[in-house]
Amino acid sequence: MPESKDILSLDDIKALVDTFYEKVRNDKLLAPVFNSRIGDRWPRHLDKMYAFWQTVLLDERTYFGSPFPPHSGLPVDNSHFQKWMELFIETADSIFSGEKAEEAKWRARKMAEMFEIKIGLVRNQGLRNLL
């Protein structure tokens, strides 16, 4: 097996995102949520994810937007976030190692925690101003 390397380029971001979302699209818990919401717009979604992670990890400003609003009404709970993180960490660890790979996992974890809390608030208390 080739020695893994850190996330250093857009090609690395694409490898991470493509591998991760292939797992998501085939996961029995996550696939129904993602596939029903995204439908046939997967290429567009992946392009957004490339830009998001390129901005976050490589400090190359290619993503402009707010990541939470499109997720605010998803029918998800803690089990979905746990599975999402499991697949993300599994993917990152299988392809990369190093400082940026660790940062990607840390940021993904923080984002999942924040999204879970905010989705719960929107759902349970109708706090639309979180968007």
Image (cartoon, rainbow, N blue to C red):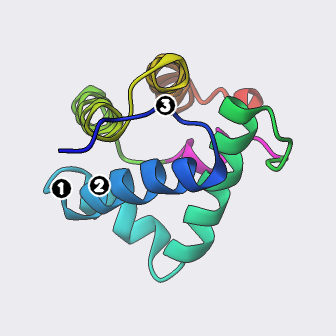
The type of residue carrying mark 2 is Val
Residue 93, picture quadrant: top left
Q: Is residue 113 visible?
A: no
Taking the magenta stretch, the answer to whether it contains residue 70 is yes
Q: Position of residue 91 (x, y in %)?
A: 30, 41
Residue that carries the numbered disc 3 in the rendered image: 6
Q: Is residue 90 magenta?
A: no
Q: Which class describes the residues within 10 Å of circle 3: few (<14), some (14-19), or many (20+)?
A: some
> Residue 50, relative to residue 109: is it above or below?
below
Q: Secondary structure at mark 2?
A: helix
Residue under pointer 2:
24
For label 1, the crowd category at 10 Å Cα-Cα, with few meaning under 14, some 14 to 19 and many 20 or more, is some
Amino acid type indicated by mark 1: Asp
Q: Residue at x 44, y 20 (%)?
A: 109
In the rendered structure, which disc, 3 or 2, sits on the residue that comes first in sequence? 3
Query: Dividing the picture into quarters, in which one does residue 72 lie?
Result: top right
Res. 37 in view: yes
Give, as a single range, the part of the protein colored magenta. Answer: 65-73
Q: Nearer the viewer, residue 42 or 122?
A: 42
Tell me the residue at 77%/28% (across/down): 129
